[in-house]
Image: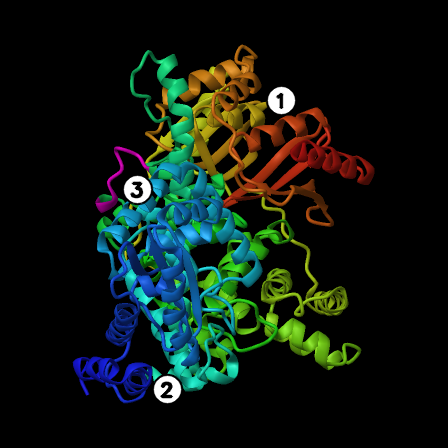
Amino acid sequence: MTSTDMRKDAEDSGPSGYAAARLRLLTEGVQSGPPRRAALSELTDDWLSGLFGAGAEGLRGVSLVAVGGYGRGELSPRSDLDLLLLHDGSDSGAVAALADRLWYPVWDLGLALDHSVRTPAEARKTAAEDLKVQLGLLDARHLAGDLALTAGLRTAVLADWRNQAPKRLPELQELCAERGERQGELQYLLEPDLKEARGGLRDATALRAVAASWLADAPREGLDDARRRLLDVRDALHLTTGRATDRLALQEQDQVAAELGLLDADTLLRQVYEAARVISYASDVTWREVGRVLKSRAVRPRLRAMLGGGKPVAERSPLAEGVVEQDGEVVLARAARPERDPVLPLRAAAAAAEAGLPLSLHAVRRMAAAVRPLPTPWPAEAREQLVTLLGSGQPTIDVWEALEAEGLITRLLPDWERVRCRPQRNAVHVWTVDRHLIETAVRASEFTRRVHRPDLLLVAALLHDIGKGWPGDHSVAGEIIAKDVAARIGFDRAEVAVLATLVRHHLLLIDTATRRDLEDPATVRSVAEAVGSQSTLELLHALTEADALATGPAAWSSWRGSLVADLVKRVSAVLSGGEPEDPEAAAPTAEQERLAIEAMATGGPVLSLRAQTEPPTEDQPSGDPEPLGVELLIAVPDQAGVLPAVAGVLAMHRLTVRTAELRTLDLPDGVEGSVLLLNWRVAAEYGSLPQAARLRADLVRALDGSLDITARLAERDAAYPRRRGVVAPPARVKVAPAASRHATVIEVRAHDAPGLLHRIGRALEDAKVRVRSMHVSTLGSNAVDAFYVTTGEGVPLPAGEAASAARRLEETLRA
């Protein structure tokens, strides 16, 4: 039966005819989705128009108006009918009688009705007092009666909305936020409310209202499709339950999936989550834009007065190469060329997360449209930026979602597609698989001071459940995937093996600690054999806790933590043995000897900058990763203050230290004295590298005391606005027991920041200790440093002095 036939039945037989036609449309019609909603709205329009016509004969200045969802023509099988009987106030008695003729037939059919009778002035007054009424009127649609009356109200309501937008939009945003807090996030709930949860149909309607204000607009790509999918699911839910419900309960998901022709309930949830994610991201972007516009409107009059009426220029602060901050967002620099810079998305994302700022929608879309794929394996900078992004704590989540929204994550990590929006039907888990992986990385970022390789911990956190998109044991499948991903992003063979072990055994510690007898030596030995080394055990311990904390409140407790810690202690005892080697450098190269002799002859610093070598090709051994940045060799006659001076000069010139080694070099026979040799890998924060001559000149001044590095760094920091940035875990400094026979080893783990190595060097100088050698690594945003220090006489520090020096250094870094 066609919609025309159904309309004729409704017209011929009144309410019973409408009811029969409605039932046939919902049960026998082959159409579904938008066509069925439109047909149901049209059928209802014709029926209500007939009722209006029969009751309003001879009555003027009255119209029947559909508002809300019905006004948008989006009737689901059990939707309310939202109706407004609009009148000019000339004959209230006749209007009341007409209302009875309209409302009672609707109630008689058991349909839910939200109704009101108002004049245009009353409607506008109510809308001004009640935001929900105003939102409903924005979708007002004429059904019957005086068209001019309806059109006048629509025009007035839209004008009111646009005039009042600076006041009403913050109110609407607060309403959406409160609802989201109350109902949760649709994209993660196992039994979501399709309408009320964050990312649901209410939020989609709010975005329409923002667009109607002309103040800001939502990202439109995919938004209509996301909204349609949620409406389709609600239609199927109404049909399968026979109730006007928006909550997708577990016991109804299989039926709803079947109604929609989907494979199973998981496929249904994944579609719901994908739609909700589009709406949630669009909401975030839109409300941010609303805030920016309202703020600029408030500030602009003052700025214009100060600038004599000229248009203010937006301030742009550099964050990284090709990346700047503008109006509270991270945008691309004017000189950025995404088509020539495949690392740019990761660099921009890392800079945004580190600064605690959102990534501009325009920037993400421009990168998604133009950027080239990264080579395989990734260049070292890309790997470093990924680690920095993962280690940035809570801001990582919003930045990751911005990349995800434009498809950049699956382009960087194709295996991500299988876990994206994948539900976890487990009461313990509160997130989808992909969000759980990011939450685990966020938790792991809190533990980066506990491990020697924070980069491996963070990447393992990202990959530990990557096998859940495949059949079988997800740990076994994940090990295979992790090997491939780790090699592709540029880790060497040994690092790939560690990551594979972490993924394969990420449940080993918690399962063993809670289900096995820890007093049985065989239990402990089996864990030790699976883990293989102390360093891997350290990483696995941190990953276990991060994974559990990211799962949900029921997955971790002090009792579980104590059991795991006990197991780790026992396994560590089995794995211990062998004294760590003192990393005294091997014999100097010919170039290093030449620089050392020249430094001794001139009595001042000598340095050499060597340009970065080409990245390795596919057939180069993965154990030889390409260097990152530029190699800087410095030779200085042995004297106090060299470390803070060199580190300070590099910080002044905005050079990031990626790796650094310092050692004392005895000169060849016949040449008296010793030289400090520094072999560092540096990279410019942004812009080009400084000339070697400028570096040397500033280093000479720093060493002779004529250059106040501390003051210069403080002046530069004061010139830039303070950002909330990342709240990194506090620095951790400890004395490594029995690490060297020749020196005391002080280990520093801290958040990398400009001038960090300068501060460490000054603190060690103040403690009156001599740095004999050191090894510094920057892994993402984490500095992992080891300093081999002695007394002035060249012997290891007494235990008390060593502990005091470490404590003072930690206090300095935490200040």
Asked where in the image residue 237 lies, by quadrant, the reply is bottom left
Magenta segment includes 396: no
Q: Which type of secondary structure does the marked residue at label 3 adopt?
A: loop
Q: Quadrant of the C terminus?
A: top right
Q: Name the residue under label 1.
A: 640
Image coordinates of residue 66 in percent, x first then y, are: 33, 62
Q: Which amino acid does label 3 sit on?
A: Trp
Vertical position of residue 408 compared to residue 275: above or below: above
In the picture, measured across the screen, residue 83 lies left or right of residue 714, that is left
Q: Name the residue under label 2.
A: 258
Q: Which type of secondary structure does the marked residue at label 2 adopt?
A: helix
Image coordinates of residue 202 in percent, x first then y, are: 43, 60
Q: What residue type is labelled 2?
A: Ala
Q: Which of marks 2 and 3 is nearer the N terminus?
A: 3
Depth order, front residue of 84/710: 84
Depth order, front residue of 636/483: 483
Image coordinates of residue 536 in percent, x first then y, are: 59, 63
Q: Earlier in the sequence, mark 1 or mark 2?
A: 2
The part of the chain drawn in magenta is 332-339
Main SS of the magenta segment?
Answer: loop
Tell me whether circle 3 and circle 1 mark residues in contact (CB < 8 Å): no
Q: In which quarter of the image is the N terminus?
A: bottom left
Image coordinates of residue 710 in percent, x first then y, are: 57, 20
Q: Name the residue under label 3.
A: 214
